[in-house]
Amino acid sequence: MRRFDLVLRGGRVIDPGTGRDEIADVAFLDGKVAAVGAEAAAGSGAVERRVDGCIVTPGLLDFHAHVYWGGTSLGVEADALSRRSGTTTWVDAGSAGPGNFAGFRKHVIERSETRILAFLHVSFAGIFAFSEDVMVGESTDLRLLVPEACARVAREHSDLVKGVKVRIGAIASGTNGLAPLHLAIEAADRAGLPVMCHIDRPPPRYVEVLELLRPGDVLTHCFKPFPNAPCWADGRVREEVWKAREKGVLFDVAHGKGSFSFATARAMLAAGFWPDVISSDVHALCVDGPAFDNLETMSKFLCLGMPLTEIVRAATATPARILGRPDLADLSVGSTGDATVLRIVEGEHLFRDVLGETMTGDRRFVLDSVVLAGRLWHVAEPART
């Protein structure tokens, strides 16, 4: 009988990366996935956990978050939030720029038990003034946006930096229009990386941003409410949005404090336009609502009718592919030994969007446990009924 370090027994394994959706055991050995299915069932583990009635997924990947805790005003603590959200890999979306990424790496990333990757902000100081007291758009001063410095630091930290972030819109970039995006594309081109572009209030307009983005680039906050929504008032998806998807632009939810509305989501899903990536944009101003964490965002899409397997794909396999790290988000033998175990709890659950609109859903995701590098890292307290 084969011996493993850990075996999860009896769960429904949903693994879009390998196409698996079945009741199966999952075994881990030496920090990696060692067996799934019959071979795992035939072995024994030093630690065994029954997960009957649960969903076992690759470790959840929150593609847009802000976890430079202590170094920026908007940062939250990654490991603490992982114990609520089941996230095993965080992608910090531009909290740090070329001028302070080394500190982010040394003081936060290297000390974190959960994995943190990053999109490096093209602004030299990253997002440096984002709080209830001070709100200064870092892209309003073009002197801070130096493509040469961004590309150089991205190459120096290529193991962690997986893209270039830029924030544009009336709040983030003032009257600079599309200029910050042009500079971010310059930096990303030199570093061989994709761009993640934030939009807030116009100008510029949603469709103008899409025209500039390249195949493989990411439009984040893709289901924004009016103004700068991807659909017309009657619910029709803008033609430019369809064309951008055909071109290869990727669409990321990034819920946050101001970037997700039920009305937009309903219109887009009714048209068959699902997001490529579901992420939370969790930060200090929305960690206590309305975003909370990515399980909350995933639960909203579950109640809005997005298929379960596609929700899992949007929080695992697709973001991992964008990062060039498919090993982070599948349960094939030899892959990174991370897994998230979830329950779907039925009942009446109240959800809120960024406009204050509420929706009563009939189910939600609740965390059962987290496996990190092949070990049972966290077991959640039983959900209250």
Image (cartoon, grey):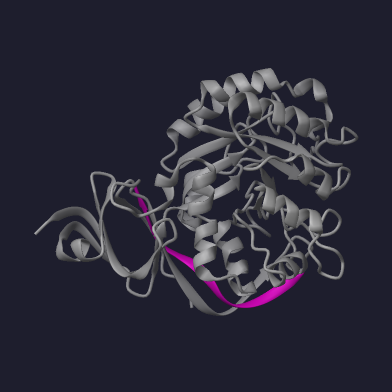
Left or right: 336 as drawn, with respect to 177: left
In the image, residue 304 above or below residue 249: below
Residue in the foreground of this view, choosing between 333 and 73? 333
Q: Does the magenta stretch include residue 361?
A: yes
Which residue: 80% across, 20% down?
A: 143
> Where, by quadrant of the figure, is residue 277 drawn?
bottom right
In the image, residue 373 above or below residue 298: above
Q: Can residue 176 be seen in this view?
A: yes
Q: Position of residue 150 (x, y in %)?
A: 65, 23
Q: Is residue 232 magenta?
A: no
Q: Position of residue 210 (x, y in %)?
A: 76, 46
Left or right: 275 as drawn, with respect to 343: right
> Where, by quadrant of the figure, is residue 197 drawn?
top right
Q: Can residue 285 be seen in this view?
A: no
Residue in the foreground of this view, choosing between 251 and 132? 251
In the image, residue 349 above or below residue 40: below
* Magenta-drawn segment: 357-372
Q: Main secondary structure of the magenta part?
A: strand
The quarter of the rendered structure image containing the N terminus is: bottom left
Q: Where is residue 267 in the image (x, y as percent from the top left)?
A: 75, 69
Q: Where is residue 19 in the image (x, y as percent from the top left)?
A: 41, 62
